Image: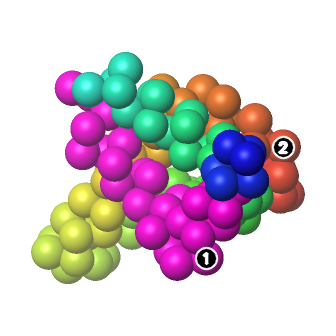
Amino acid sequence: NVASTSAAWGSLLHESGAMAVPKLLDLAAVYGLSNSAPLCTLLNTTLELVPPLRTDLGAVRPVLLHVLGELDGLASDAAQAEDQAWDQLRYVVDIAVSTGTFFRACPAAIDAFALSGPK
């Protein structure tokens, strides 16, 4: 039965950590701009094959919002060392680009992200 085989593979991918939200965000950051069509297919298929990733994506929402909220702190904290400021800025930009590219490549994931967690 194809459905039970797909469910078994999806469960294995999720439980082993082979497919996790941070890995999907990394794929989006690396391949999203230059290969958006194949990436979109990969992400949509992965979310279909591994339904718990939708729940995981919703759980990541507060973390992403916190990191993106750090932009305000970076702009207002002029007292920190320049190297530390650049490191933090690169980190926040990396998260923003990864997330933006992920949602551009996989609009279906926006529902899982937007509908869970506190607003």
Q: Say if 117 sits above or below 37 in the image.
A: below
- Looking at the image, tell me whether mark 1 or mark 2 is earlier in sequence order: 1
Nearer the camera: disc 1 or disc 2: 1
Name which residue lies at 38% across and 33% down: 39
Q: In this view, does 82 lie to the left or right of 116?
A: left
User: What is the secondary structure assignment of the residue under circle 1?
Assistant: helix
Name which residue lies at 51% across and 55% down: 68
- The location of residue 74, given as percent across then percent down, is 39, 62
Quadrant of res 76: bottom left
Q: Does the magenta stretch include residue 14?
A: yes
Start and end of the magenta stretch?
7-34
Seen from the viewer's position, the closer of residues 46 and 115 is 46
Name which residue lies at 32% across and 63% down: 91
**Would you call the spot at circle 1 few (<14 residues within 10 Å), some (14-19), or many (20 or more)?**
few
Report which residue position mark 2 lands on. Answer: 115
Q: Say if 44 sits above or below 92 in the image.
A: above
Name which residue lies at 84% across and 43% down: 115
Q: In this view, does 33 lie to the left or right of 37?
A: left
Disc number placed over residue 106 in the picture, else none: none
Per the picture, the main secondary structure of the magenta-coloured stretch is helix
- The location of residue 98, given as percent across then percent down, is 39, 47
Determine the CA span between mark 1 and mark 2.
Answer: 24 Å
Residue furthest out toward the front: 1
Seen from the viewer's position, the closer of residues 32 and 7 is 7
- The location of residue 111, given as percent across then percent down, is 75, 35
Q: Say if 93 sits above or below 90 in the image.
A: above
**Would you call the spot at circle 2 few (<14 residues within 10 Å), some (14-19), or many (20 or more)?**
few
Disc number placed over residue 15 in the picture, else none: 1
Residue 67: in sight, yes or no?
no
Q: In this view, does 20 lie to the left or right of 116?
A: left
Residue type at mark 2 is: Leu
Residue 99: in sight, yes or no?
yes
